[in-house]
Image: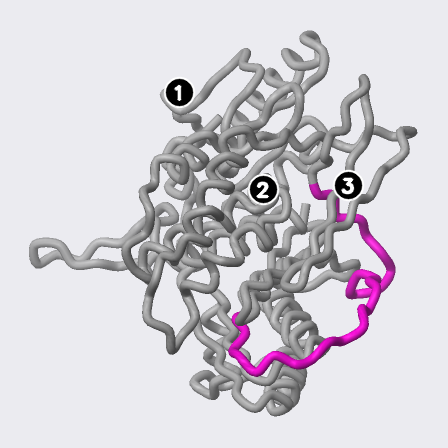
Amino acid sequence: MDAYSGYNQIRMHPFDEEKTTFIMEERVFCYKVMPFGLKNTGATYQRLMDKIFEKTIEVDIEVYVDDMVVKSEKENRHCEMLEYVFKTLRDHQLKLNLEKCSFEVQAGKFLGFMLTERGIKANPDKCQAIIDMSSPQGVKEVQQLMGKIIALSRFIPQSAEMAQPIFGALKKGRRFAWTSECKEAFQKLKATIAAPPVLTRLVSGIPLCLYFSAFDNAISAVLVQEREGEQRPTRPHQSSSNSRLPRRINPRRGREEEGEWYLLVDGSSNHTRSGAKIILEGPTGVLIEQSLHFEFKASNNQVEYEALLAGMKLAQELGTKKLTAKSDSKLVTRQINGDYQVKDPQLAKYQDRALAMASSFDNFVLLYVLRDQNERADLLAKLAST
């Protein structure tokens, strides 16, 4: 289900209406409802949905901003939940966009994935877009291809190793060349995406099998459960621990890479918990993704700082000397770069830690990117916080 002009259904506080003024034909107007384009619209709407569906969210209902999914295993229960959702929306004077709502379906798209009875499938439109692509003719087209591959990486076994020749075409200082190795890797990726695996939820009581695959440039792992004679990969599940960062094994450090590393971070916080996502890409095509699940209450700005600090720490442990970090938090990037003054004492401590860690790199750059350019990290951070 999809809300009708979702942001416009929330009324502005009378005191804040004058802050949304705009000029039209020599007259001044203001919004009485929350307009599109404000920085906090998404977070405000998400907070509203979390509050009104507090008892059922993550149990029978999944909500991401103005998109809602009601899920049930039994028909009677499903009807009860639909009635509850409609009544709750009516009580809070929220309307749905009927043209974008679907009922009595066994499968549907949600957050860029296909939800089915069997599990989570890759978006067929995104898969077909890669299958229909011709061989890239330049660096820009290779970058577009790698963006699409990264978006589907959880459905592509050994994606980093498979795409290694294609990553090589992006190395700086080299003249672009689409080699035979690139062509072969591209065809393998197309064949894999043509029949991607289905990610299923964990079933209690069934043993888990962990498979590792190690290469010179990448390490992959997958969790599977055997059901009905078939091994099925499971969807990621963020478990909580008492520490701020998840426990992990520290592998033996190899030789340090002299090339530049790229870090993409994003944090997300709601009324019950918070989480973050880190994507670290090395000069040889190594791709590391890490989900963080925080056991403490924090504001969105604090979580954004936590995500950045965790990403910088991971880069340090890998011996990185040159790091370019990207975040969609304008406040965090401007504060660390010295463009904004830090007035919050708590954020000042975060800034000091970030600057201290930045000084440990030979070269450190922090860039601000728009949220739509940080879509994958943003989505996974949202999932990590639920």
Which is closer to the viewer, label 2 or label 1? 2
**In this view, which residue lies farthest toward the top?**
76
Residue 40 seen by the camera: yes
Answer whether residue 51 is magenta in the image: no
Residue that numbered label 1 is attached to: 98
Going from N to C along the chain, the mark reached first, 2 or 1, is: 1
**Residue in view at x 60 percent, y 56 percent:** 268
In which quadrant of the rendered view does residue 263 lie?
bottom right
Circle 3 SS class: strand
Identify the disc placed on residue 156: 2
Q: Nearer the viewer, mark 3 or mark 1?
A: 3
Question: In the displayed structure, does residue 274 sit left or right of residue 11?
Answer: right
Q: Earlier in the sequence, mark 2 or mark 3?
A: 2
- The type of residue carrying mark 2 is Ile
Query: Which contiguous range is marked in magenta?
Result: 236-262
Q: Which residue is mark 3?
A: 223
**Could you tell me how far apart the alpha carbons at marks 3 and 1 are, in whole angstroms?**
39 Å
Q: Distance from label 2 to label 1 (Cα)? A: 35 Å
Residue 159 x/y as whole percent: 58, 49
Instruction: Return the disc, 3 or 1, that comes first in the chain's sequence.
Output: 1
Q: Position of residue 182 (x, y in %)?
A: 43, 53
Q: Quadrant of the C terminus?
A: top right
Q: In the visual, does 67 lie left or right of 97?
A: right
Mark sitting on residue 158 = none
The amino acid type of the residue labelled 1 equals Leu
In front of the other: 131 or 269: 131
Residue at 33% x, 47% y is 135
Residue 223 location (% of width, % of height): 77, 41
Compared with 134, 349 (above or below) is below
Q: Magenta region, mostly helix, strand or loop?
A: loop
Q: Residues within 10 Å of mark 1 (few under 14, many from 20)?
A: few
